[in-house]
Image: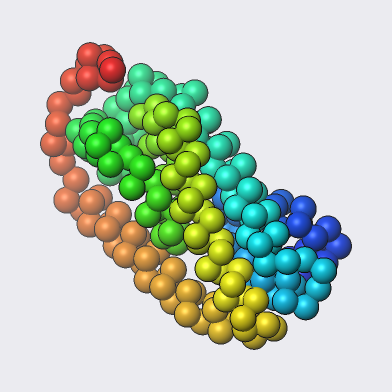
Amino acid sequence: MTDWAFRLIDATGYFGVFLLMMLETVFPPIPSEVIMPIAGVRAAHGPMTLPGVIASGTAGAMAGNLVWYGFARRIGLERFKRFIDRYGRWLTLDWGDVEKVRRGFRRYGGAIVFFARLTPNFRTFVSVPAGLTKMKLLRFLAWSTLGTAVWSGLLAAAGYALGSQFEKIERIIGPVSTVIVVAIVLFYIWRQVTWTRRHESSGSDSVAD
């Protein structure tokens, strides 16, 4: 993965950074923790600049974010409610949980989106509740772009500063990401073991704005 990313960025420059970050957002197994430090390394030793790398990486990630946001917004709460009623047991979600998220986004949507963009493994998926709750597009774009730019900038700057020793970044961020993934898996297992449907289905009125 690392060699391939190096080759793509070397061959296509800013477009390669854009493309990799877009794919990373749509398909999370391609990690930005690798892509942006590599781009930072190349900015330190090649024709690209650090601001250009940050801008192209942010733009690519935002393109992917908009895919998820648009997909979730198109589904809408009505169809999502039917999905939760049928499969919520396996997602460990009932409609009461969705309503809590909905209320949270109404009050703190901007802050939630911003800080999620700085969190490994949550950066992509926060676009889904934002779309489902019909968060205003301009607000979504503003907070998402800000958080994404900060995240991309930190990783690219680290690669720029460390040069070819970007493995040091992976040694720091990698364990943090692993801990978060393990915590999510344990939380999911706990929710499955203790699952009870805490809220009765509230009907179609519960999804009306």
**Residue 104 appears in view:** yes
Where 77 sits versus 161, above or below? Answer: above
Instruction: Locate the N terminus by quadrant.
Output: bottom right
Relative to 183, 169 lies left or right = right
**Residue visible at 56% across and 69% down in the picture:** 155
Residue 88 placement (x, y as % from top left)? 30, 36
Tell me the colour scheme of the image. Answer: rainbow
Q: Quadrant of residue 41?
A: bottom right
Residue 44 placement (x, y as % from top left)? 72, 76
**Residue 72 appears in view:** no
Q: Quadrant of residue 14?
A: bottom right
Relative to 5, 172 lies left or right = left
Residue 83 placement (x, y as % from top left)? 37, 28
Q: Nearer the viewer, residue 192 or 132?
A: 132
Residue 49 placement (x, y as % from top left)? 73, 66
Where 119 sits versus 162, above or below? Answer: above
Q: Nearer the viewer, residue 143 or 33?
A: 143
**Residue visible at 52% across and 47% down in the picture:** 145
Q: Quadrant of residue 63?
A: top right
> Tag count in the figure?
0
**Residue visible at 28% across and 16% down in the picture:** 208
**Residue visible at 41% across and 73% down in the picture:** 176
Q: Nearer the viewer, residue 193 or 170?
A: 170
Instruction: Locate the C terminus by quadrant.
Output: top left
Where 84 sits versus 143, above or below? Answer: above
